[in-house]
Structures are given as C-alpha cells and as structure tokens.
Amino acid sequence: MKNSESPRIHQAIKIATTAHEGQLRKTGEPYIVHPLAVKKILEEWGMDEDTIIAGILHDTVEDTNLTIENIKTEFGETVAFLVDGVTKLGTARKGMKDLDSYLPETKDNLLRLLIATGSDIRVLIIKLADRLHNARTLSALPPDKQQKIAKETLEVFAPLADRLNMGRLRVELSDIAFSYIDRRRYDYLKKLIETRNKSSAKSLKKIEKEVSDILTKEKINFEISGRIKSVYSLHRKLEKYNQNIDAIYDLTALRIIVDDITSCYLALGLIHSLYTPMGGRIKDYISVPKQNGYQSLHTTVITPDKKIIEFQIRTREMHEYAERGLAASFFYNEQKVTENYKQGKIQHLPTNLLWINELQAAAAGLRAGKKVDIKKLKLNLFADKIFVYTPKGDIVDLPKGSLPLDFAYRLHSEIGSHVVGVKINGKMSNLNTHLHNFDVVEILTNKNQTPKTTWFDKVITSHARQKLRAQLSKIPKKSIIPSKKR
Ligand code: MN
C-alpha cells in the first residue's frame, strides 16, 4: 500500500479485504486481487476518490454480507450510490428484473441500463474498469464462458468505450475479446502487422527524421511517435476492403503532438510540402470532430520513395482526450476544459458531455417521481448504431439500417443460410424490414432452405455479404436463381 493513499481508501481496502475473506477467483488468487486491480485501473484513468473507493467495494454488496447501508454509513451517500449502481448493472445484465422499478413502462433493457447508470456516469466507468480486468484474466474461465464474455465485450463494452472516446480502452478490450473469438485470425493478423512494421521500420525512421527536421527548423514544438494499428481494427478494415492488405494505408501511422491548433495546421502544411498528399485522404477532425468528440488532423501522403504513410496531428489535450476519453474529462476537470476552450486551445467542448447531461436529467426526473417520455429521450450515444435483442435477451449491435438477414448472419452463418422468415417484436415481418433500436428479433429457419443470390439486396453489412458470397460459391452454378437486380 502506498503512503500517499488517503485514510478513506485505506479503510475501503481493509473493509473489502475482510468482506471477501476466503473467496477465491477462478484464477485461484484471493478475490481481493480483483477489486484492487479495478482500483488501480481507475487511478490510471485519473478518477476521483469516491469512484476509486466504489471500485474497491464494487463486488461487496452482491457477493458478501456487506450492505449498501453499511457502505453509506462508512463512506457516505455518493460511494453508496455508485456501488448500488454497479450492483444493479450486474443484475441488469442477468435479467434486469429489479430494474422494473426504474422504468415499468418500458421493456427496453439497454435503455433501462443506461438510465440506471446515466444518473451518474461514473457507474459506467467503474463497470468498464471491472470488465477490463475480467477481460485481462479471461484465460482462467472455461471456454464457453470465455466465448460469452468475449462476445459481449466486443458487442457492448468496446463500442461503449468508443462512444466515450476512450481509445486506449477500446483497443485493449476489442483485441483481447477478438483473440478469444477467433484465435487463428488474431495470431495471423498480429504476425502480419509485426512483419509489415519490421519491413517498413527503416523507411519510417527516414520519414520521421525528415519531418522532425522541418518542424524543428520552423520552430514548432512537437513530439513524434509511431502508432501501430490494433489487430481488431485491422480485421474490420480488411473485411471492408475485401481482404486486400495493400488497400490499407494506415497500418502504421506517425503521430505528431504539438502545443496548439495553429501548430497542427502548420505541421500539416509542412508535411504536404515534403510529400504528396493522397486525394480525399485529408481529414480535418479538428474543425469537425467525430461524434464521440475525437479531434485530430489526418493525412495520407506518398513519399518520393513511393512509401505511403498516414500522419495524425493533434494537440496534447486532444491526445489525452482521444486516449482516455470521458475519464480524461474528469482528469482534466471541467474548469480546465472550459479554460482551454476560452483560450482557443480546443475549439469544441467535448460533445459527449451533451448526452450525459440528457441522461442525467432523465434519471434525476425518474428519481423525483416524474414521468419521462422515453420516445423524447434521444440516445445520442448510439446514434449510428442500433441495438437489438435475441428472444433470449442477448444484445447485438448492428449498423443503422440493418435488415433481418444481417442480424441472422451476425448470430451465425448457419442461421443466416437457413432463414425462412422473421418475427420482429413478436410479429411476422418481411425480410426487407429495417430493424430498430431495441427490437426483439426472432429468426425462423428451416434446414431445407438454401442461400439465394437475391439476398444480396436484403443485407447491408459487409459481414453478411461476405458470408453469403462464400456460401453461394459452394452451391453448384445451375441451381442458383439469378437475381433481377444487380
Ligand atoms: Mn467485479
């Protein structure tokens, strides 16, 4: 234990250790190892003391004799509220039955879940820290549990981290999960990245030097470093580009961090004076940030030696925010963000604070006994994604505009190939019906059904398209009924 730790944190560790006494993790270690790991993650994210204490205590109410009342007496209202929120979220995932009291009028589990956490977003941050440590120690679990947790991590928690602009977390969660879901592919791509990086190391060094020289000459304060693409994001990109690795230009990128926005644009100009920018590949996420608040300048250039390389240019603040996201906005407390905004160091306040405010208002309203209009409650968080449920209540996320066959292929390619119909929210529906947020989708199959070329018109995801193409290629040509449309 560190000496710098506050008496309250000390006390929380003592209480949690006693409460979990005798319990073991699946790894064989004493249970307390887990809450302490969660504590460390929350500290790394720069969270406040109440959140750290709640992180230490997060499993006590569900798994030990400690009660919320005990926690309230010892650590106060806020910590008790946070622990209660994390506990409810755990229950929520199992069936959400006790969340009925929150929103009896809706069966939308994810919405309930978000409102339960929305009242204090720190609940979600503790949950993400909890999930991160569980993912890191996933090898201790039996294979079926590993698959289930890996899938959920990839489908719910990694997108959530992305929405909170917690880039570093998103990368770690999705890479761990993907390594369990498709080990061979993971190993293959990891190797591929390494090999490619090794062979480009020399030319990269040369480019790094040329750029450093010109930035120094122009008296721009900077840091430069290589950014290696994550395995899972390469996998996703390869799916999008028909597995053509040569179409992927950002396998390695150079990242330049400068003092202010003016220097970002100056650096961009200098890079373009050295190398030829590729058309259509200059992206100004500083003027127009991504929806999750991400800011940076991106450009892909061709060097005289015909090397293609991507540059990402941003300020220190933008970098912190891209890596740590929402947690960083706690770290750099609101005042600092506002101060930077006033001084012109950042042009936009973090956009994600908007939906958090909205969610918090809804949750506060509910607690005060007010009726909340669910339809009016916009979930900006998932604006370009929808979440639908299997009849068993598992959550699947899909791009907006997805159709039943996209969903079916997402569940399993064998389910996809045998689709004969679909029930949406209990009603028989057409395969051309767009799915909506929180729909419960039941796929009807028949073992005699075979995939059809006409189905290409009924899918929008590259995943479904790819599976369908693979299945059709195995069917003898003459039995394929040609599609009228192309
Ligand atoms: Mn836990």
Image (cartoon, helix red, strand yellow):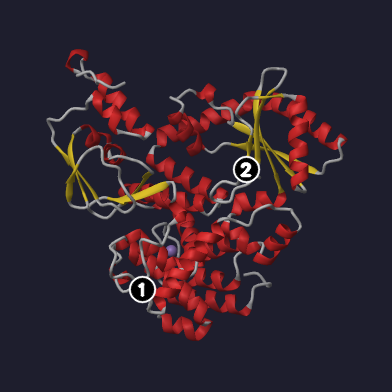
Residue 234 x %, y %: 50, 34
- Residue 27 position, x and y percent, is 42, 57
Q: Residue at x 40, y 71 (%)?
A: 22
Please name whichever residue, 144 or 333, is drawn nearer the observer in this view of the structure.
333
Image quarter in which the N terminus is found:
bottom right
Q: Is residue 33 visible?
A: no
Q: Is residue 195 left or right of residue 148?
A: right
Task: Report ligand 1 position as a quadrant.
Answer: bottom left
Numbered circle sitting on residue 116? none
Farthest residue in the bottom direction? Answer: 73
Residue 383 vertical placement versus 265 (above, below): below
Q: Position of residue 394 (x, y in %)?
A: 29, 53
Viewer-nearest of discs 2 and 1? 1
**Dot 2 amino acid type:** Tyr
Which residue is located at x 39 percent, y 62 percent?
376
How far apart marks 2 and 1 lie (CA) works out to 38 Å
Along the line of sight, which residue is nearer the eye, 315 or 166?
Answer: 315
Give the quadrant of residue 311: top right
Instruction: Give amino acid for label 1.
Output: Lys
Front residue (pair 144, 98): 98
Residue indicated by mark 1: 371
Image quadrant occupied by the C terminus: top left
Residue ID for mark 2: 285
Q: Position of residue 261 (x, y in %)?
A: 74, 46
Q: Earlier in the sequence, mark 2 or mark 1?
A: 2
The residue nearer to you, when weighing 69 against 384, is 384
